[in-house]
Amino acid sequence: MKNKKVLAFVLFIFLLLVPVQAFAVDFDITEVQIEAQLNEDGTADVTEQFTYEFEDDFEGITRSLIPKEGTSIEEFTASDSRRDLEVEVEDGLYKIYRSGNDGDSVQVELNYRIVGAVEKFEDGAEFYWPFFDASNESEYGDMTITVIPPAPAAETEALGYGEAFDTSNVTEDGTVVFDLGNVPSEENADIRAIFESDLFPGVTAQDGTVRDELADDREELENEAAAFARNQQIAKSIGIPAIVILGALLIGLVLFAWLKASRRKREARSGNYEFFVPEDSMSIPALLHFTNPSYVAANGMSAAILDLMRKGKIRQLSEDHFALADRNTDHPHEAVLIGLLFDTIGDGQEFTLEQVEIYTKNELNHEDYNAATAEWNKEVRAEVLAHDFYEKHSGLRWAVGITSAVLIGLAIVSGIYGLLPWMALSIALGMLALGFAIGYSPITREGHRVRYEWRSMKNAMDQLPTDQWERLTMDEMQRAYAYLLGSDQKTAERKANAFTAAEPANDVSGFAMNPILMTAVFVSASTTTSSSASASGGGIAGTGGGVGGGGGGSGAF
C-alpha cells in the first residue's frame, strides 16, 4: 500500500513537471506568411497563413495573441481552403477547430484586426509589434512578415529585434518585408516599421520623435552583432583547438587506462586452472560483494549466516531454528546481522526462520528491517574497501575532473556563439571526463587474483565430481558452499544433498541442513519489505515577452 502511494505521488509530480507539449499532438509548422495591412486610422488588418504537417490525429490548432498595452485584438476569424472554422477564445488563446489525421498537411488562414496598432510622432508613424514571443512553444519554418502602409511610402525605415534582426527589406512602394526563415521556439522577434506621419490622418500625434530612437537601436544592435562576430571568431580560434586537444588527450588516457586494466586482468588469468578453494582472506559476504556484480543481498544474507556458523558464532538447533553461540565478531557487518536476527527478530539468544517471515510480513517492521539491511550492506562494502582492491589515483582523477569542468565551460561558450557541433562534442567529452573522474578506480592485481580464483571455483563446482568435493576439508566445504549459495543458487541447490551428506552429523558448527529454505525465506523477506519501500502544445496564451508586453505563439491539439 505504501508503495502504491509513493508511485502515485511520483506520477503526480511527473505530470506537474513534464511540459504540456509532451502530451500534445506532434506537428511541424513548415511555413508562415503574416501580412499586416496598416490603415489610415491606425488599425492593422492582419492575415496569417500557417501550414501544418501533422504526425498524429488532431482536433485543431491554437494561436495565442497577446496585444501590447493600449491595443486590442478584434474580429478574429479562421478558415481553410473549404470553409470558415469554429473558434473558441479564452484569455488570448484562440482554439481553431479543424480536425484531421496523421500525415495530413493543413493550411489555415487567420484574420484579425489590431486596434491602436500605429503610434504617430512628430517625425513619423510606427508599427512596432511582437507577433510572437518567448512564450511560443512551436518552431516556425520559413516565416515571412510583411507590413504594408495605407499608401505608397517614400521614407520607410525598418528594424527587426531578436530573431528578426537583419531580416528586413523595404520595397519600392515602402512596404517592409521581414524574411525570418526558420525561427526556433521560445524566441522573441519584434518587428518595427516607420512611415510618413501624413499617411495616418486618423491617428493623433504624440510629442517627440521616433526615427532617432530607431537609428540608435540599429546602431546598438549592429554593434552587438559585430561584437558577437568578433567573440565568435575568438571562440573558433581558441575554443575549437582546445576542445580537439583536450579531447585527444582524454580519449588517449581512457584507452591507455582500459588497455592497462585489460592486461592486468589477463595476467591474473594466466596459467591452467585446477580446482581449489581460495584462502580465507575475508568474509563470505564481502567476497560476494566484490566478486559478483549481480550480487543479491538476500542471498548474501543466507551465505553470511552460514559463514557465521562456520566460525562458531551461530549454532543450528533444527532446520529453521538457530542459537547465538558468540557475540564477538570479526567484522562490524557480522554484529549488525546478529543484532537484526537475534535481538530485533528473535529473543536475544535464538531466532527461527518462521519468526523472520512473521516479522517481515508486518508492514510496521519494514522500515526497521530495511534500515538494518542497508547498514549491513554498508558495512560489507566497508570491509571490501578496507582490502585496497581498488587503486585510488586521486591526483589523476582531480586533473580529469578539472578537465571536465573546462570542457563544459567550452561547451557553454560554443553554444553561446552558435558553434553547435563543437558544443555537442564538448558536452560528450565533458561527460566522459566526469565519468572517468568519478568512476576510475581500477582493480589491483590482488583484486583480480581474488576475483579470478573465487569465480573459477564457482564455475568449476557446477561439474565438480563428488569424490573431489569430499576430499576438501570441512572448512573448505563450508566456505565454498556458502560462497556458492550467495552467488549461484541453482548450482547450490544441486550441491545441497552432496554437501549435507558429507557433513558429520555431530559437527557442532551445525551447517544448515536446508540452506535453500533459509535463502528462500530471506529472498521473500527482501521482496516483501522492498515492495513497501519502493513503492496539448500552445495551450497557454503565454506571458507576453515581446515589446509593450505583447507576444503570442502557435500550437495544436
Image: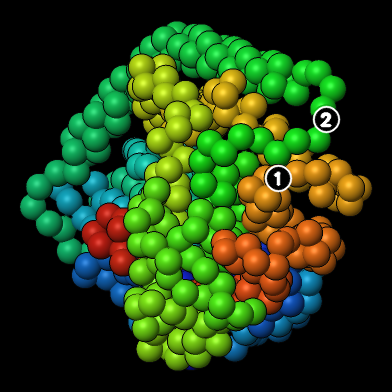
Q: Amino acid at mark 2?
A: Glu
Residue placed under numbered mark 1 in the picture: 473
| Residue 369 visible in image | no
Residue 533 horizontal/vertical position (percent): 45, 76
Q: Secondary structure at mark 1?
A: loop
In the image, which disc is placed on residue 274?
Answer: 2
Report if the CB atoms under discs 1 and 2 are less than 8 Å apart. Answer: no
Please tell me which residue lies in front, 413 or 332: 332
Identify whether 43 is placed above or below 272: below
Q: Secondary structure at mark 2?
A: loop
Q: Residue furthest left?
A: 207
From the viewer's perspective, is 437 left or right of 305? Answer: left
Residue 47 horizontal/vertical position (percent): 53, 66
Please tell me which residue lies in front, 439 or 381: 381
| Residue 549 visible in image | yes
Of the numbered discs 1 and 2, the one sitting upstream in the chain is 2
Quadrant of residue 536 in the image? bottom right
Residue occupying the point 57% across, 39% down: 280
Residue occupying the point 63% across, 20% down: 261
